[in-house]
Each structure stands twice: as C-alpha cells, then as structure tokens.
Image (cartoon, grey):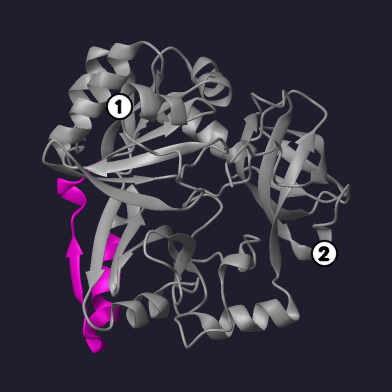
Amino acid sequence: MEELRKTCLHDKHVGLGAQMSPFGGFDMPIQYSGIVEEHNAVRNNCGVFDVSHMGEVLVTGPEAEKYVNYIFSNDVEGLPDGGILYGMMLNHNGGVVDDLLVYKRGENHFLLVINASNIAKDVAWIEEQAKNFNVDIKNISDETGEIAVQGPEAEAALEEILAIPCKELTFYTFKELDRDGKHLIVSRTGYTGEDGFEIYADHGTIRDLWDKLMASGKVAPCGLGCRDTLRFEVGLPLYGDELADDITPVEACLSMFVKLNKPEFIGREVIERQKAEGAPRKLVGLELADRAIPRHGYEVLNADDEVIGYVTTGYRGISVDKSIAAALIQTPYAVKDNELKIRIRRKTFPAKVVAKKFYKKSYKK
C-alpha cells in the first residue's frame, strides 16, 4: 500500500488535534472542532483551509496560449494578465479529465491548478497533449503550498492579520507580490460559496502565514469535511462525484464553461453534439421531505421503481437544514418539481427535483 503524503502543514494539524484521514493520496484534516461548527464559521465569519494537496502546473513558451486553449474547455484568448478562468480538460469522448483553474500570469505564461487526486494523471495528460506545441510544462506541485481563507471576514483577515493588500481584487482575479523576499500569489477565489482568497507560496511562507492566522484567534481552522458541505450547498462540483472521465460538462450542467466559438479543442465534437441534441443524463438537485440522508452511489428511481440514475453527493444541508442531494439521472426525468425516489439502504424515500444551488452564494463580484 502506497504511503500517504503529507502537506507542509501536516504537523500543524496534528498539533491542533485535527481528525486526519486519507484524501487524494494525502493525510488530510477532516475536522477540528466539528464539521457543523467549521461550516458555520465560514458562512458567518472566517475559516482557513490547508489546500496544499492541490496540484500546480506551469505552462510557458511561444505557444502556451494556443496550447492551453487546446486542452481547456474555456477560452483564455483575451484573458487579461491577473485573470482567472474555471473550466475543464476533456478527453476525446467529451468526458472530464479534470476541472481546474487557469491563471494568466503574463503573455504565454499560465498556471494550472488541478485536483490533488488527479495530479499524476493530469500531468501525464498535459505532457502527452503538448508534444506538437512549442511549450514548456513544469509540475511545481511538490514545492508549492496553498491556504484558502474563506468567509465574509476573509478580506479583513488578510488585510489586518497578514497585512496582505487585497481590497482591490475582484472575484476571479489575482495579484503577485513579494513579502520579506518571498513570492506570493493571492487570488480572490475559493470553493465555499463565500467571499475568500487562496494564497500560493513556498512551504515555509505558507507555514508562517498559517501560524499568524492561528495566533490571531480571529479565524477557525477548517477541515475537508466542511469544505465538502460548503461547496455542495452552492452547487459546486467535486471531481469523482459530479465530474468524471465518463461524465460530460453538458451532463454536469457546466456547458457554460465550454466555449464553442474558439479554435479546435479536445472533446469539442461530443460537446457540440450534446449541446445541439441534448445529453442522455443530467445533474439535478433533489430535496427529501424526510430526514434520511442520501449518499454517493444510492439509486434514484422513478414512480414505477425503475432505476434512472444515482446520487453523486448527499447531506443533511447545514445552512439550509434539509436532506438534499445532487444526482445524475436520465434527462426526461430532470424536470423541476418532478417526484422521484431515492433508495436508502432497504427503503425508498420520496424526493423532489429542485435547483442544484441549495444556498445563495456570497461572492464579491
């Protein structure tokens, strides 16, 4: 069995008494004080996450923009320096290799931020597709740390506790700055549905920033448990649940992040066809009247008890106080207010089709 990797903050989590568990090949904190408490801290105040397990890949060279546009579903042409785009890398069948953020650092200079569980697969894919382009690919995941500061008080925390100027940053933009001889990338991004920032730097700098935040007593350390409940309530997908090699962006209701009015890119033909003809499956939200909790993989049934799909994520929503789920189901049943059922263990429970965004986001635009 492969040994779990550790982030640069691993000893900090252990010292704080975090409950640790494997995630994406890393030993990661799941919770500290508790998932509900940490979830509410982010919704109402400010929480800090160690996301150093995420992967970072640099793409540079004369054809970097052309190449990134070829492997990325969104359109980076015209993206200004300091701009960020969300999108996906697609395979030739239109399925999702990974979803990611693309940061434009300068002309033909891009940073790709990929999911921890996919780093090896993604880097191999990126390098393979780059063979016919004049680009340089550099995987800097092992040398890069990252923290996410999230919540309505996140801006104040960065300004007051870390003395990092960030007021002028708008949603999905970033700045690069030098602090005490160390280089930082600070972006107004996150994965919680609240205002927030993500900071990338070398391991030592990330440890120093974490210590300052913890010493302030004004922010809560948060684990991956509440990161999942937070992102799910606002309809943000998780790779391996709502996205996978055999799930297309059209099925996942993310076709807005696939731009067909740009030059050729991997997976284009399948997406173009599904946008025109419709996809066989669609991701929907489901709401249960019962307090039973649906989980990933549970079957979704129609009125005749025929299996028509499965749950991708399910929780008792903390902010909305309802049993909710996202499910990938056959498209004819993906109609708002349609009455379906979810099989939970040996019983079935009625569920109604609703919007996937169960909680209103609070991003700063």
Q: Quadrant of residue 181?
A: top left
In this rendered view, identify the residue nearer to me: 280 or 195.
195
Residue at numbered disc 2:
332
Query: Disc 1 designates what residue?
Result: 162
Q: Quadrant location of the N terminus?
A: top left
Residue 215 lies in what quarter of the image? Answer: top left
Decide: is 340 above or below 244. above
In the displayed structure image, the side of residue 225 where residue 119 appears, left or right? left
**Crowd class of label 2 (few under 14; some 14 to 19; many from 20; radius 10 Å):** few
Rendering coords of residue 6 (x, y %): 19, 34
Above or below residue 271? Residue 317 is above
Query: Which residue is more in the foreground, 241 or 131?
Result: 131
Residue 97 spot, x, y in % from top left: 42, 65
Amino acid bearing label 1:
Leu
Q: Indicate which disc, 1 or 2, sits on the residue closer to the N terminus.
A: 1
What residue appears at the point 80 percent right and 57 percent down from the top-left corner? 334
Q: Amino acid under label 2?
A: Pro
